[in-house]
Image (spheres, helix red, strand yellow):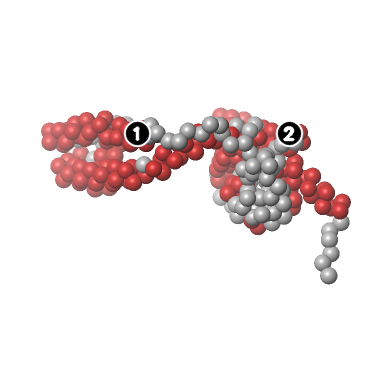
Amino acid sequence: METRPPQAAVSWKQKAYSIIFESDTPAGRAFDIALLWAILLSVVVVMLESVRSINAAYGPYLRAVEWGFTVLFLIEYIARLVVVRRPLTYALSLLGIIDFLSIAPTLISLVLPGSQYLLTIRTLRLLRVFRIFKLGRFVGEGEFIVRALKASRYKILVFLTAVLTLVVVIGTLMYVVEGGQNGFTSIPKSIYWAIVTLTTVGYGDISPVTVLGQSLASVLMILGYAIIAVPTGIVSAQMATPTVPASAPPAFKQVICHVCQATEHRPEAEYCWRCGEKL
């Protein structure tokens, strides 16, 4: 015979869930805003710790604050697993993985010193700001750019293949023309020179000396200016393609499904569009 959990426990979990996962209540909104501030401050602490002079003067204090934030985020992560109906589903979701990665570097730093600087991955959690402040229009514009990139992916792939072929051929020619005595000690290093020259950044750590090598480099630099405009033109042309205009961005209910973590439910929806669970 199936036993039901006590009503007090159910209501406690429901209240905690609405605070942690939803932002359409004052408590949930306050929780999310406090979480955003904690994320920003923790990233600033990691950045300050990477500055040698600041680390020498305040290193122990910064590490203590860093561990404090890590413990805070660990408690928050455990709380999310406790209140959600299917913890494994949440843990394996994109947001769940990002939440775990935001605390993992500090723990790994106990074994691999220096890995705590990877805590800047916490900035990915700032994407929640679009949900908290209901900036749906910005999300729609982002999806517009993503659609344009997806529609142009084959053209961009062909372009990148042509560029890769070009730098391999010219890099090999420069290796043959200049040789190791002028810094072109191998074909991979010569290809590296071709890439930085084609992209017009030209670090200057390797440069041709012979007349033939300088002539080849001049041709490659001129090609660089022409090539840079190609991917921009491809994506711009795709974005300029007429599409069916939307009269207004869709309005969504600020509720996350307890079971599958799905969002973007219609205001009139009573059940999850993905798994059918009652909202």
* Residue displayed at 75% across by 51% down: 83
| Mark 2 Cα shell of 10 Å, populated few (<14), some (14-19), many (≥20) | some
* Residue displayed at 86% across by 56% down: 6
- 123 left or right of 195? right
Nearest to the observer: residue 66 or residue 122: 122
Does the rendering let one see residue 233?
yes
* Residue displayed at 56% across by 32% down: 248
Query: Disc 1 marks which amino acid?
Result: Ala
- Inter-mark Cα distance, 2 to 1: 43 Å
| Mark 1 Cα shell of 10 Å, populated few (<14), some (14-19), many (≥20) | few
Q: Is 73 rendered above or below residue 246?
A: below
* Residue displayed at 60% across by 47% down: 95
Q: Is 131 rendered above or below residue 7?
A: above
Number of marks in picture: 2
Disc 2 on helix, strand or loop? Answer: helix
Q: Which dot, 2 or 1, sits closer to the camera?
A: 1
> Where residue 277 sits: x, y (%)?
69, 54
Nearest to the observer: residue 77 or residue 248: 248
| Label disc, if present, on residue 237 of the rendered structure | 1
- 252 left or right of 151? right
> Where residue 147 sits: x, y (%)?
44, 41
> Where residue 26 sits: x, y (%)?
76, 33
Q: In which quarter of the image is the N terminus?
A: bottom right
Disc 1 on helix, strand or loop? Answer: helix
Residue position marked by numbered label 2 in the rendering: 30
On the image, which quarter does residue 68 sit in? top right
Does the rendering let one see residue 42?
no
Query: Disc 2 marks which amino acid?
Result: Ala
